[in-house]
Image: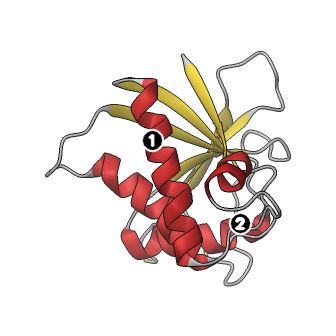
Amino acid sequence: MIDRIDISGVLKTSVCDLYSNLVTRPTGAAVRIEIEHLLDEIGDRSLVVLDFSHVGLLDFSCADEIVAKLLLQYVSLDIPRREVYFLFYGMSESHMDAIETVLERHGLALVTQRAEVTPGTTLTTSSTGRVIAKTICRAPSDDPSMTTVTRGKVSSG
């Protein structure tokens, strides 16, 4: 079963229902803790879609608190956790700027679903033009607009 968590909804219920921007480290920590509580309710093995489509701004500290710290919990070999796979949905280019920075800092990768990308495309970072390992393939769906993009760091050799 695929579970969807609306990040904007989590922000509104855990911090403040007046805005949809993820800024400041305490805000990011509160949102991540609420996501962790939701994951506890889901079960031992699941695919979770983290939906960022209604999030306005995402700063570096929130990206670190939400994305990196959440992923680090599930890739750690020291602390075995339940089997959870994440698909990040609805990321804008400004979201990805913050997220790519924290992913690179922690040596992490993620999968994101973006309708404006077509299979077979290679993406580059806009700031440096350096290719970041981004493999795009068709999602297991009948809808051709659904794609997955794997993001991560490659050596600049």
Structural crowding at the residue carrying mark 2, measured as other residues with C-alpha within 10 Å and reported as few (<14), some (14–19) or many (≥20): some
Please tell me whether residue 88 is drawn above or below residue 153 in the rendered image: above
| Quadrant holding the N terminus | top right
Asked whether 17 or 56 is in front, the reply is 17
Instruction: Give the secondary structure at mark 1.
Output: helix
Secondary structure state at the residue bearing disc 2: helix
Circles 1, 2 touching at the beta carbon (< 8 Å): no
Instruction: Identify the residue at image location x=40%, y=34%.
Output: 40
Residue extending farthest to the left is: 78
Residue 95 got which mark?
A: 2
Quadrant location of the C terminus? Answer: bottom left
Locate residue 100: give its quadrant: bottom right
Answer few, some or many: residues within 10 Å of disc 1's Cα (few below 14, many 20 plus, some between 14 and 19). Answer: few
**Residue 155 x/y as whole percent:** 41, 72
Let me know if residue 100 appears in the view: no
Quote the CA–CA distance across marks 1 and 2.
Answer: 23 Å
Judged by depth in the image, the label closer to the viewer, 1 or 2, is 1
Question: Which residue, given by chain and number where applicable, does mark 1 sit on?
Answer: 37
Q: Mark on residue 1?
A: none
